[in-house]
Image: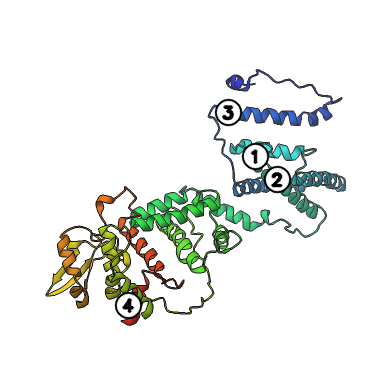
Amino acid sequence: MPAAYRKAFGKTEVRKTLKARNVSDASVEILPHLREYKVRLRRCKIALGELSGKTPNLQQIETVVRQWFAARQERFERYEKSQKGEEERSHRLQELDEYELEARAAIRGDRSETWTTNWIIDEIVSQKDWAVEEGSSEFASLRRAVGRGQLEASRREREDLEGLPRRNSDSTFASEAYTLDAQRAEQEQYGSSITELFEDYVAERKPAPATVKSYRQKINAFVAYLGHDEASNVTAKDVVAWKDHLLSTSSGKGLSAKTVNDTYLAIVRSTFRWGQENERVKLNPTKNVKVRPRRALVTRSKGLNDEEANRILAAAIRPASGRLSQERRLAQRWVPWLCAYTGARVNEITQLRAEDVQEVDGVWGITITPDAGSTKNYRARFVPLHSDLVEQGFVDVAQQKGLGPLFYDPERYRGGSDANPQSKKVGEFLARWVRELGVDHPQVQPNHGWRHRFKTNA
């Protein structure tokens, strides 16, 4: 045992007594003992920090086995050129018979009589500094991949030796797989993770906090599905598989085609597109992946109809019941009417401040501005107030307040994130209230239905 590892290993040397009667038998019998020694030595090196001890995924395993397969094919090409007659050819065919039996045993997971397979695995693990323990799922995957490589190599050699046309029986070792390996190798030089790409993308783009929160959930779901965070290892097949997983009801998701395409795929697509534009990834695996949804059956307008609108507005002007704060009472009283007359988004109204209610050229209106909270296009706009709102007393309420938010109290802020502002909570409260009023058609949103109604009437 090398001196540097004796303390970690626990021994200065390893002795094994073999039962073999000759050197030829001993060379076979010693193989599992040598393998055990190499594994223990490797563990010592990992413990001392000399080896990385990384655990490979299936893609990395197949890539490395393809490299071994290519080297073996190259050796055979040289061997074939040096063939000297029928006797050597016949001997080689007999060797291939034994080789194929061992390969099939390795694929089945049979641990006996697979010395060549074990030796190949040891060499691969040692060269790549992998932490692969016998009995682990990674070891089983590596054993199967090597066994398939051995079987495919034997088939090709046999076809060449027998003068038959060469065919590819295992797509793992097809030329297309090597092309993909080359593309991945080129891309790996960039070294970005998916989450790093996303965080840098939003840092540059600066979407609203609530949007970032929603996007991050989708990115984390993608990474969790893949089982890794390596941007360079993502393929179009991975993205398609994730898409199918989200659409499938058997996966427990069963999301709509529109949700998958416009929400989940959209942020992953934007992240990789930004990464490619900024030289962070070589390829964009999401480029051509889309969901082709079936046209949905729309049985009614997305906007609130007359009966629903009247029910909400009538309830709004009635005295609020229950234990509500002054701000929630004001929200219940005024937000539905403001949405009805302006067509604004509910969170643009719930974030209104008293100072945003202004008179411009003799016309009362509200300024919807990013200074108060998020807006869709990040721009401020002045929206005139209908005279009915002025007559009902909304301007008077704002002037009495003077400054600050109208529909929530910043003093009640409990330290939530920017992605969950108080104004958003007000909108959620109103949505629940509207549903309780009986406005519950699934194709109509309780707050956003006002915007659809306004556009239709306009």
Instruction: First in sequence, mark 2 or 3: give its number.
Output: 3
Q: Which residue is mark 3?
A: 45
User: What is the three-letter code of the residue carrying label 1?
Assistant: Ile
Instruction: First in sequence, mark 1 or 3: give its number.
Output: 3
Q: Quadrant of residue 128?
A: top right
Marks 2,3: beta carbons within 8 A: no
Q: Residue at x 52, y 67 (%)?
A: 256
Q: Residue at x 72, y 29 (%)?
A: 34
User: What is the three-letter code of the residue carrying label 2?
Assistant: Val
Marks 2,1: beta carbons within 8 A: yes
Q: Secondary structure at mark 1?
A: helix
Which of the pair 438/147 is nearer the observer? Answer: 438
Marks 1,4: beta carbons within 8 A: no
Which residue is the extreme one toward the bottom?
457
Q: Which residue is mark 2?
A: 146
Query: Residues under labels 1 and 4: Cα distance?
Result: 67 Å
Q: Residue at x 80, y 32 (%)?
A: 28
